[in-house]
Amino acid sequence: VTEKNETNNASTKNVEVLDDTGPADLVIHPDDITFLPAYGWHTANNNTKIIVKVTNNGTADAGSASNKFKVQLIVDDSTVENKTTWLMAKSYRYVTFECALTAGQHNIEVRLDPDNVTGDDHSNNNATKQLKVVSCRIFNTHHYGDISSYTGPLSGGSTVEMFDVTKLVPENTTVVDLLKSVAQVEPGGSTPVGSIDGLEEDDTTSYYWYPFVNGIPVRWTPGLNWSYQIKEGDV
């Protein structure tokens, strides 16, 4: 093939191949533990989702499909739940717990492989993070101004129920995550929320969803989402 430039037809790359005989190396840090409000459609599911990122930095598998290790959740010094999993070398996965926590401060600890199934170095297998659970209220209305069900062109003629829910959530939950915990939410073309339970924004007539926190509108900035974080007593 006759080409304009014959000097850019080849490439090389160095690849490091690791010894897969081991060992495994399970790792967890406080930043690997995240908190979200549990989902309940238009209801106050007051549980907290605790999502744990479990990583195996080692060059051997950590456990196997038939020999799994525990991911242990400890809340306020009491074991709440154990889940089991395994990890291939140089991989990670998320393990999610859901538990009922009262309003107030809690100490959350996660331990990986407490029974030493994998035989790895356990010096980095435990992590602790503080969590505060607060009470807030979330409700939605629309441009017609009521809080009853709506049937019209923005919902395709289907009934869409408005809601008003008071629930417990992890402090610093974002507005969008709070909304997603009580409703079915889809993103919009230029906004983080374009549809709530089938009631859609309309670009042609400039109908959009906007959050108000304690009566004050929350601005949306591209790349920052609706970044306000929920505090105790917020509406």
Image (cartoon, rainbow, N blue to C red):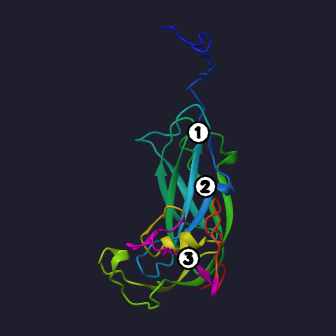
Which residue: 55% across, 49% down? 115
Q: Is residue 22 above or below residue 132?
A: above
Question: Which quarter of the figure has residue 78?
Answer: bottom right
Which residue: 61% across, 69% down? 226
The foreground one among 17 and 97 is 17
Give the amino acid at mark 1: Gly
Read off the residue under disc 1: 119
Disc 3 element? loop
Q: Is residue 191 above or below residue 26?
A: below
Marks 1 and 2, the one that precedes in the sequence? 2
Question: Bounds of the magenta span?
Answer: 191-216
Q: Residues within 10 Å of mark 2 (few under 14, many from 20)?
A: many
**Magenta span main SS:** loop
Read off the residue under disc 3: 210
Which residue: 31% across, 81% down? 159
Give how far apart the Cα atoms at labels 1 and 2 are: 14 Å
Q: Residues within 10 Å of mark 1 (few under 14, many from 20)?
A: some
> Which percent across, then down, holds residue 216?
65, 84
Give the amino acid at mark 3: Tyr
Read off the residue under disc 2: 111
Question: Which quarter of the figure has residue 74?
Answer: bottom right
Marks 3 and 1, the one that precedes in the sequence? 1
Question: Which quarter of the figure has residue 218?
Answer: bottom right
> Does the segment drawn in magenta span residue 52?
no
In the rendered image, the quadrant that contains the C terminus is bottom right
